């Protein structure tokens, strides 16, 4: 039986000319937070490819929690605050974050090292009604049926607007690796489906991310 999970995705922009050692220290510090008891899974690292031009980001963090309260504990934990204060804020000039509730993808394991994600944030038009919002969630959720390369999809409505820059829907498409992600994109079917989403949106941020070798696992 599946159970509820909380997805937490943060995009960071490390400023130009930042010493690479400081960017690496930020990534190491963020990945070190996987040891916190409330964290089920956490990965942080450089973005492989930014497919949006309106906003610039260089790094991403993706983590999972059992409950909204666990996410709150993580955000307010002294270790997290320390990493943000000492490693993130001194070198980043922009960030955004979305949080949404999903079912746990039928008990699927955490993304394996070397697997790839396509992360999409959607800013919906203000005049949309709930029925139209539901259509956007439905289109994204059914992408797996349109592509044999996609292993699973996580999608939901953001519940943390303060850090989201007006974006209200987040999704992640999971692929075995970068080759499969690129193959799905080249076939064009996903693009046709996502055009339906763009009809309802005032902006979309899309990033591709490859899970680094050293990762924590869901317990």
Image (cartoon, rainbow, N blue to C red):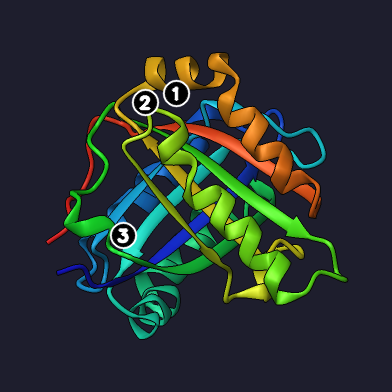
Q: Quick check: 150 above or below 37? A: above
Query: Residue 15: where, in percent of width, then height?
Result: 70, 38
Q: CA distance from mark 2 to mark 1?
A: 7 Å
**Depicted 141 relative to depicted 8: above or below:** above
Q: Rate crowding at label 3 as few (under 14), some (14 to 19) or many (20 or more) other CA atoms within 10 Å.
A: many
- What residue sits right under mark 3 in the picture? 33
Which one is in front, 152 or 68?
A: 152
x and y percentages locating residue 54 in the rendered image: 82, 39
In the image, what residue occupies the spot 37% across and 26% down? 149
Indicate which disc, 3 or 1, sits on the residue closer to the N terminus.
3
Q: Residue furthest bottom?
A: 69
* Position of the C terminus by quadrant: bottom left
Q: Name the image quarter holding residue 150.
A: top left
Q: Nearer the viewer, residue 184 or 122?
A: 184
Please give the label number shown on residue 181. Answer: 1
- Of the residues tagged 3 and 2, which is closer to the observer? 2
Image depth: mark 3 or mark 1 in front: 1
4 up-or-down from 185: above or below: below
> Would residue 78 be visible to someone looking at this image?
yes
Identify the residue position indicated by label 2 in the image.
Answer: 149
Image point 71% across, 31% down: which residue? 16
Q: Where is residue 165 shown, x and y percent of the image? A: 75, 62
Residue 159 lies left or right of residue 198; in this view the side is left
Image quarter hosting the N terminus: bottom left
Q: Secondary structure at mark 2?
A: loop
Q: Is residue 126 left or right of residue 55?
A: right
- Badges 2 and 1: C-beta atoms under 8 Å apart? yes
Please say if the residues under marks 3 and 2 sit with CB atoms less than 8 Å apart: no
Question: Can the viewer see residue 57 in this picture?
Answer: no
Q: Residue at x 69, y 28 (%)?
A: 17
Which of these two is toward me, 42 or 201?
201
Q: Secondary structure at mark 3?
A: helix
């Amino acid at each position: 039986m599946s159970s509820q999970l909380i997805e937490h995705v943060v995009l960071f922009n490390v400023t130009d000319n930042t010493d690479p050692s400081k960017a690496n220290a930020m990534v190491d510090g963020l990945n070190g937070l996987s040891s916190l008891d409330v964290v089920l899974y956490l990965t942080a690292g450089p973005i492989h490819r930014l497919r949006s031009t309106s906003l610039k980001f260089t790094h991403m963090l993706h983590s999972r929690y059992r409950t909204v309260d666990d996410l709150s504990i993580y955000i307010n934990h002294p270790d997290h605050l320390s990493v943000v204060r000492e490693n993130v804020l001194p070198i980043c000039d922009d960030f955004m974050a979305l949080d949404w509730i999903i079912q746990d993808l039928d008990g699927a394991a955490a993304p394996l090292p070397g697997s790839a994600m396509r992360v999409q944030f959607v800013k919906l038009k203000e005049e949309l009604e709930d029925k139209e919002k539901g259509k956007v969630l439905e289109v994204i959720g059914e992408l797996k049926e349109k592509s044999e390369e996609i292993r699973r999809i996580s999608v939901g409505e953001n519940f943390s607007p303060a850090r989201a820059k007006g974006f209200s829907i987040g999704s992640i498409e999971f692929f075995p690796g970068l080759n499969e992600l690129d193959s799905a994109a080249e076939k064009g079917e996903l693009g046709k489906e996502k055009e339906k989403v763009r009809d309802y949106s005032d902006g979309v941020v899309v990033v591709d991310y490859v899970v680094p070798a050293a990762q924590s696992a869901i317990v």
